[in-house]
Image (cartoon, helix red, strand yellow):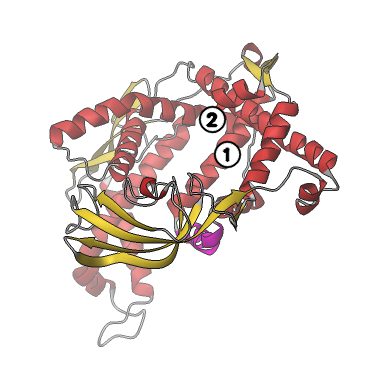
Amino acid sequence: MQPTKEKIKGIKYELSFEIPADVFETKLSEQLAEFAKNHEEKGFRKGHVPMDVIRSKYEGHFIGDVINNLINETLVSYCEEKKVNPAVAPQVKVDSFVRNEPLKFSADFEIIPEIKDIDFAKISVEKKVAKAGDKEINEAIQNIASSRYVFEEIKDNRKTKKGDVVDINFVGSVDGVEFEGGKADNYPLELGSGAFIPGFEDQLIGKSKGDDVDVNVEFPEDYGHEKLAGAKALFKVKINAIKEKKTPAIDDKLAVELKRKDLADLKQYVKELLEKNYETASKNLMKDEVLDKLADEKFDVPESLVNQEVEFMFAQYKQTNPNEKMDEKAEAKKKDELKKQATSRVKLGLILADIGKKNEVKIEQNEIQNAIMQEAMRYPNQAQQVFEFYSKNTQALEGIKAGIFEDKVLDVVLSKVKTKEKEVSASDLMKVGK
């Protein structure tokens, strides 16, 4: 069906249509007939209710559906004929509906723009290459050793120092009155950790096992318990034991504990791991550079999609800043600030979708499962909850798919662009990659 009005400006379409009255009546009759097949009415057998009874009692219930279906069919047919895809659902307005007269409606929408083929051979990106030297390998192994520390109780009369763990009993009071939660026995406290009220741990440095220490502190004004906020407190502390951190020696024994044959094998394994990390960091930098260059492509970006992205980004901002109060003017200003970034996101999303379609990029089910598994590994104690979250949250699952799709499309792009290698130090590579 051809529109009675067709105004096209770039990617913006303004259309008007008239659907003949007989087309509407035919569709309405078809729906009523379908309804009548299984309808039961008192005094009539199932499926044998006269059509005049059906019409008199139920016709009004179907008119809205028929109008909507006809509008949708008309717009779908128009878009298929013109080979265009609306960016978002068209804004539709019924201009006139009178029985036995044409149904008149208008529709405004933006289409997904046509993106010209990109000549990837003209795009050049820098590939930073770093090697793991003795310094990086030794530092990594030292970090591994440090992470396997244990605390051993000291046997001599050495005084406490920062980094020690002291086993303490303590009782806290304000104005001579003990308060709830201010008492514990055999509590392990690492001095310098900042786990207790500011000043508490400092007053236990330079003490000996068996010492009784009066610790005077002042609770912060923003302390969680209102009655203690800003209050001066005295803690009676007994030091039961002092433990110091011991890290294992870097030798063959450590290597065997880490499932390697010996120290040399451990060093080779760490070298390979580091260089794999460097390769990933370098690839991510290349992807960022490619995205920057793709963003220079020129085409009309649908404002409707940008507005959706602005609303999404604003909702995220509000979620991460729940205590920020914003009036209508402040909200409008914030959304305006987000618009440039939202436009860039939409633009890149359209480009990547186009590249993915033209290169037949598909997402496999095992890739989705692996991505969720990787996410679950970040929360080892809540892995089951992570799996359940993605099984029940469609939006979150779509986010996982979008990330996989983007990575695969960028891999395709990187395989087509020119790359120029540049040797850099590992520290410089990882610094830039942060």
**Magenta span covers which residues?**
380-392
Of 19 and 365, nearer the camera is 365
Residue type marked 2 = Leu
Indicate whether 30 appears above or below 420. Answer: below
Indicate whether 121 appears above or below 198. Answer: above
Query: Is 58 positioned to the left or the right of 420 in the image?
Result: left
Query: Is 131 positioned to the left or the right of 390 in the image?
Result: right
Secondary structure mostly seen in magenta is: helix
Q: Decide: marks 2, 1 in contact (CB < 8 A)? A: yes
Q: Residues within 10 Å of mark 1 (few under 14, many from 20)?
A: many
**Residue 86 percent location from the top left of the image:** 40, 35
Q: Can residue 27 be seen from the camera position used here?
A: yes
**Residue 237 percent location from the top left of the image:** 36, 60
Residue identified by numbered label 2: 352
Q: Can residue 24 be seen from the camera position used here?
A: no
Residue at 42% x, 35% y is 79
| Residue 26 location, quadrant | bottom left
**Residue 361 percent location from the top left of the image:** 63, 37
Of 251 and 409, nearer the camera is 251
Residue type marked 1 = Phe
